[in-house]
Image (cartoon, rainbow, N blue to C red):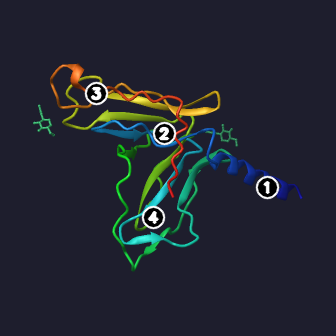
Amino acid sequence: MELIFLFLWGLLRSGEAAGHGNGKCFAPLYIEFAEITIDRVMVGSKVRYKCEAGYRRIPGESNFIVCINDTGLIHWTTKASVCERDSRATSQQSERKPENPVTIVPSDTAGYCGIPSPVEHTTPRVTEYAVGQELHYKCLHGYDARPPTSDISTCKEEHGKTFWTRLSLLCTNDSKSGEEMTQPIPVTGSTGCFAID
Ligand SMILES: *[C@@H]1O[C@H](CO)[C@@H](O)[C@H](O)[C@H]1NC(C)=O
Ligand SMILES: *[C@@H]1O[C@H](CO)[C@@H](O)[C@H](O)[C@H]1NC(C)=O
């Protein structure tokens, strides 16, 4: 009886943690000519396995994993398979908004998730970030001509809204004066809820 109760409670709690809305940030701010690294993936973050070209999602199969805290053991949930060969392989859908490449480089295993396990014919991509998650931005090699060339954006929550803290990066190979350069994008208060299949 108690076990069943605990199980249900656990389900409700994890449903809450995985849900859209408060406590999560979505698409990170985009900075041209920059890349993002994450050294500590926080509990509550979510990864989506995207099928590679020529493959499609197995019907009824979820393609998400979540970084969970299993009574003190922090780890990604697992997925055995996500995609199957698509015989009707059609051309890929149109380009989405630009994104900075994101690499997970775990530096600390205690309390954080590491690199998601590879799943055949997929590319894993973080799609939801827990509040407190830090993203390290760095200008790509060749576009780091003038400082600041790196910065950190953090997922924050204030007054029930989640947002990424603004960045000041100047990723360019241009040696001319600052005036002509793209200013950092000031984004605040965005709940940033982008539906991704
Ligand atoms: C994980 O859960 C344990 C309790 O089960 C708690 O003591 C610990 O602080 C949690 N860690 C994180 C990173 O949430
Ligand atoms: C900057 O990049 C552009 C295009 O990538 C290139 O044509 C130009 O030569 C570069 N300038 C410098 C100073 O490296």
- Mark 1 crowdedness (10 Å alpha carbons): few <14, some 14-19, many ≥20: few
**Tag 4 and tag 2, C-beta contact below 8 Å:** no
Does the beta carbon at disc 3 come under 8 Å from ligand 2? no
Q: Nearer the viewer, mark 2 or mark 3?
A: 3
Is residue 113 rendered to the left or right of residue 173?
Answer: right
Q: Which residue is mark 3?
A: 170
Secondary structure beneath dot 1 equals helix
- Mark 4–mark 2 Cα distance, whole angstroms, equals 21 Å
At horizontal 64% and vertical 27% (from top left) the residue drawn is 159
Give the mark nearer the N terminus: 4 vs 2.
Answer: 2
- Mark 4 crowdedness (10 Å alpha carbons): few <14, some 14-19, many ≥20: some
Secondary structure beneath dot 2 equals loop
Is residue 13 rendered to the left or right of residue 60?
Answer: right
Q: Which mark is residue 8?
A: 1
Residue 24 % position (x, y) = 58, 40
Q: Which mark is residue 119?
A: 4
- Mark 1–mark 2 Cα distance, whole angstroms, equals 29 Å
User: In the rendered picture of this protein, how many numbered marks are placed on residues?
Assistant: 4
Query: In the figure, residue 139 lies in which quadrant?
Result: top left
Task: Give the amino acid type for the residue marked by disc 2 in the picture.
Answer: Arg
- Mark 2–mark 3 Cα distance, whole angstroms, equals 24 Å
- Mark 3–mark 1 Cα distance, whole angstroms, equals 49 Å
Q: Which residue is situated farthest in the bottom direction here?
A: 87
At horizontal 44% and vertical 56% (from top left) the residue drawn is 124
Give the mark nearer the N terminus: 1 vs 4.
Answer: 1
Relative height, residue 77 to residue 181 (above, below): below
